[in-house]
Image (cartoon, rainbow, N blue to C red):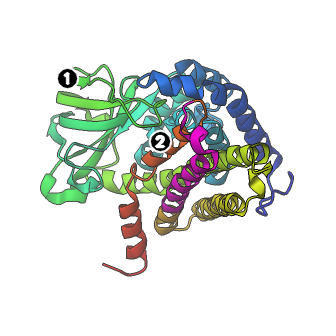
């Protein structure tokens, strides 16, 4: 068994090894590149990705039988995600983004499909993408309009996806389409679509407010023919697979935002110890000290909610409500803590010379993606019996 950490978790030797690997990589390779990546705006740092791949940090979540790291428990993935995103949340999320692609394949795919599509991810070379969001369908994923029409041994896909992460680089997409819009959720079906499929086109990258390490773009589908053998599960099973994917991915967002909030706390705390005003370090002024205390409390709250959700998930328990809480609290606490860090640095916090203004911009995305904070509150309230 490994050391006992302050939250009461007792890490195994393997968990501790993964955490230390991620922490070292974040400090050595991620944090020094973060500012330049942000300023580049619409380019992913593929060199950092490749270095991470060599260490297994892009494929640790892929089952061992397919050549991946075989970290099957979500708790260990949470701990790794926190450390990577403590270095930089955009680059950290990029490094682990193939996990979002692999999840619906693991949930819905046949053994043959899992072997065919997950095996190549173990090499670390290909980037992938998941295409759900559309111009007219964001939070209401059941209302997607991208169509999938059966034509013999193939499906013909038509539609338009937007805000698709990794779209300019992805070699494969998991695309969610509907075989019958009138059925809403019961018509949603998932397909694995190669990048080079005739009729599939990717638009130019979107300039973004933050998390610029991950490049987003539109994906256009014009009579794209997909073999029926690339359908994941049966027709109409895609929505359930997507919700199962969200149960895990929202917990990982909770972990990512906890890492970001902790980075903001660490930086603000160190600055407050060194910055002197009125003859003393500003940490000795109660207004600053109390702000840091609130930041520390919020970081630990996010961490503990995320660990709870991951532990329940690993135990096979339903976690839709708990994962929504982890994402909601984690994202809003990250927004609060990064704002507090900017406030602690004062004028320097507003300068791009320091990372806290970038972190505040990065944090905002997590209150929006994979279900806005409003949607998370809706999910939580439904779990309480509200309809």
The answer to if 334 sits in the magenta stretch is yes
Q: Magenta: predominant secondary structure element?
A: helix
Q: Is residue 326 left or right of residue 245?
A: right
Instruction: Give me the disc on residue 211.
Output: none
Can the viewer see residue 61?
no
At 55% from the left edge and 37% from the top edge, which residue is drawn? Answer: 96
Q: Which residue is mark 1?
A: 199
Count residues near mark 1 (Cα–Cα under 10 Å), then give few for <14, some for 14-19, many for 20+.
Answer: some
Whole-percent x, y for residue 37 in the image? 52, 24
Q: How many marks?
A: 2
Residue 297, located in which quarter of the rendered image? bottom right
Q: Which residue is mark 2?
A: 361
Q: Which residue is nearer to you in this view: 199 or 381?
A: 381
Q: Which residue is nearer to you in this view: 238 or 127?
A: 127
Quadrant the C terminus occupies: bottom left
Whole-percent x, y for residue 339 in the image? 54, 51
* Contact (Cβ within 8 Å) of mark 1 with mark 2: no
């Amino acid at each position: 068994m490994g050391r006992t950490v302050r939250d009461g978790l007792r890490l195994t030797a393997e968990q501790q090894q993964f955490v230390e690997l991620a922490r070292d990589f974040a400090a050595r390779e991620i944090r020094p590149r973060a500012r330049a990546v942000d300023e580049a705006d619409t380019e992913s740092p593929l060199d950092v990705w490749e270095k991470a791949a060599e260490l297994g940090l892009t494929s640790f979540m892929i089952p061992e039988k397919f050549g991946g790291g075989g970290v099957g428990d979500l708790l260990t993935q949470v701990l790794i995600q926190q450390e990577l995103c403590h270095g930089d949340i955009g680059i950290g999320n990029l490094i682990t983004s193939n996990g979002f692609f692999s999840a619906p394949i693991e949930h819905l795919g046949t053994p043959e499909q899992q072997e065919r599509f997950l095996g190549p991810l173990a090499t670390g070379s290909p980037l992938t993408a998941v295409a759900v969001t559309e111009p007219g369908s964001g939070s209401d994923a059941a209302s997607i309009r991208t169509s999938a029409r059966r034509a013999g041994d193939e499906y013909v896909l038509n539609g338009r996806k937007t805000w698709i992460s990794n779209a300019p680089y992805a070699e494969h997409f998991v695309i969610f389409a509907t075989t019958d819009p009138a059925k809403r959720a019961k018509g949603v079906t998932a397909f694995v679509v190669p990048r080079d499929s005739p009729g599939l086109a990717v638009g130019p990258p979107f300039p973004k407010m933050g998390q610029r390490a991950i490049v987003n773009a539109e994906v256009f589908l014009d009579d794209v023919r997909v073999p029926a053998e690339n359908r994941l599960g049966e027709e109409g099973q895609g929505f359930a697979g997507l919700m199962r994917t969200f149960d895990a991915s929202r917990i990982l967002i909770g972990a990512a935002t906890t890492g970001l909030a902790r980075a903001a706390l660490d930086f603000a705390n160190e600055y407050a110890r060194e910055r002197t005003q009125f003859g003393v370090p500003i940490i000795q002024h109660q207004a600053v000290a109390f702000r840091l205390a609130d930041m520390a409390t919020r970081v630990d709250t996010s961490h503990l909610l995320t660990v709870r959700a991951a532990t329940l998930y690993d135990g096979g328990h339903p976690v839709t409500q708990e994962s929504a809480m982890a994402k909601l609290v984690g994202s809003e606490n990250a927004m609060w803590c990064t704002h507090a860090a900017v406030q602690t640095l004062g004028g320097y916090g507003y300068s791009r010379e320091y990372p806290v203004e970038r972190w505040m911009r990065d944090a905002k995305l997590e209150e929006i993606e994979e279900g806005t904070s409003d949607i998370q509150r809706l999910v939580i309230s439904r779990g309480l019996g509200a309809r």
